[in-house]
Image: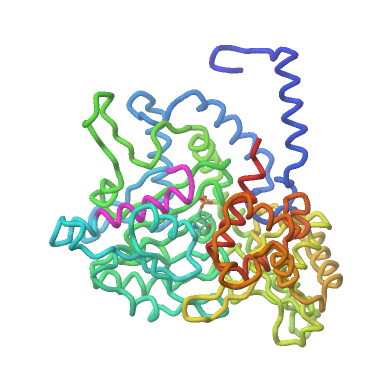
Amino acid sequence: MTPNGPTALGSRSEEILAELWRLRERDAPTHGGRLLSYVYDSGRAELDALAGAAAELARPVNGLDPTAFPSIAAMEGDLVRFMRRALGGALRRPFDGGPVVGSVTSGGTESCLLAVKTARDLWRARQQTDDPVRRPMPRIVAPETVHAAFRKAALAFGLEFDGVPCQPDGSVAAADIVSRLGSDVALVVVSAPAYPSGFLDPVGEVAAAAKARGISCHVDACFGGLVLPWWPGLPLWDFRVPGVTSMSADLHKFGYAPKGVSVLLHRGRVRHRAQFFATTRWPGYPVVNPTLLGSRSASPLAAAWAITRRLGDDGFADLTQSCVRSVSAIVAAVQGSREAWSARPGIPGLAIWGSPTGPAVALVADESVPPSEQVDPHHLADEMARLGYRLQHQPGFTQANGVRLPHSVHLTITPVTEGTLAGLITAMRTAADAVRGKPAANPWLELGALKLLGYGSAAVRSRVPGPRVAWLILRVAGAGGSSLPGNMAPLMALVELLPAPVAEALLTELIARVSEP
Ligand SMILES: *Cc1c(COP(=O)(O)O)cnc(C)c1O
């Protein structure tokens, strides 16, 4: 059924769809628990069917104008109401600056970009001068583990990104963040939790310090916003904390909606309105854009709306409990359990990175045992890819103060994981046994190859290559596309070794070539 009435597809259209099916066959498996990032699988077929039907119903409308399409305004209002209740923002306290209100965006990155733009505009409005030359460049202060979207936002909106170094276990001390707050800080960001490590940043202390200094404080709950509200035993981390001025939460993650939907909530209408762009200064229709996009799809919004209505608080609580059980099972499988009645050995040589809160878990080599017994996480992930499980490689990262965060692999645990736990844990053991003692990939081998290309000395190596040389380097380094995803470790090692601008140029080239006609 389409809005123009029931339509049977002609044979040419059927052929085209068959072609698309064939293309889809080479994709990573979106369902069934073998892909542990990118796709958030509730494990419930009915939710997917509901999301698909709702998305199809909303497909023809344009989210640009909620007065022409009141269904959009109604769904957006419902989603904001649901989310502000989940995130502790339903209570109205007169001293808080008004109700928590917000907007539906196209995803986490857009929510983060808008949080930064809003804070920057409010910061600018408080400056003594309008003269951009005499005004300092505003800063964003955030732990180094904050999502890369905030570095992108800093670049896009003219702020300096001031990353606060973390401990090697991925944790960050509130005092280290607070000591950087000053009058040029437009926004301080903490994560709930941080994507790379699963660490829940110290929201309470940071928000209190920000409030005392009149600085905006964003809690990035893009990842955790639809699981942590039902996760047991957490300190306050949301709008219940005074001083939290905005929050982001992705409905296309643990809201189980198809990609393209997130929310950004603000404490108070004044803040929310600062997010908008409106202009009457062109000869066309008066423009009012709450978000970065103009015309926008209503399909992901409709899907998210339908799923949250179907699940409600109880449904999300159930799905979250499943994640809680899976995370403890995986942590126990890696670390082993020492209880006398159920002593189990764990996976020797492998460790959990730091202490995660929520469904993001990262694996690292256990450096307390000799190298010959360690399991390199990137080799592990490559081996698991051969066994049909896709984990996400995270390169090691040397922070500004020289403290290194270890290279790791990321697992996002979703409700589907529980039904496939035995297979996943067996694969982890098998893969660990296969690579135990194998040293981390050695990028110097590839760098040897680079020498042949005249890219040998450090000085030359820091020269950012253009598309042609970058592609040559990638091919010589054996990362020309076809060897992925089963052989990411050498590429990641190269990323760790090269100066960031060079590594970024190589990865840009890799991805650009993938879809070049
Ligand atoms: C996923 C994520 C983002 C960015 O979201 P996209 O939806 O990928 O644009 C931002 N912050 C955190 C913590 C995330 O997990």
Q: How many marks?
A: 0
Residue 344 sits above or below residue 488 on the image: below
Q: Of residues 320 and 132, which is closer to you in this image?
A: 132
Identify the residue at horizontal 73%, vertical 52% (top origin).
480
Is residue 90 visible in the rendered image? The answer is no
Which color scheme did the rendering employ for the protein?
Answer: rainbow
Residue 41 in the magenta stretch? The answer is no
Q: Position of residue 43 (x, y in %)?
A: 69, 47
Query: Does 5 sit left or right of 291 as displayed?
Result: right
**Residue 248, picture quadrant:** bottom left
Q: Of residues 508 and 196, which is closer to you in this image?
A: 508
Identify the residue at the far left of this view. 128
Q: Position of residue 430 (x, y in %)?
A: 85, 67
Identify the residue at horizontal 37%, vertical 68% (top origin).
141
Residue 116 in the magenta stretch? The answer is yes
Is residue 188 visible in the rendered image? The answer is yes
Query: Does 272 sit left or right of 252 as displayed?
Result: left
Q: Of residues 433 and 315, which is closer to you in this image?
A: 433
Query: Does 390 sit left or right of 215 as displayed?
Result: right
Residue 372 sits above or below residue 12 on the image: below
Identify the residue at horizontal 50%, vertical 68% (top origin).
145
Q: Which residues are magenta?
A: 105-121
Quadrant placement of the C terminus? top right
Residue 513 sits above or below residue 487 on the image: above
Quadrant placement of the N terminus? top right
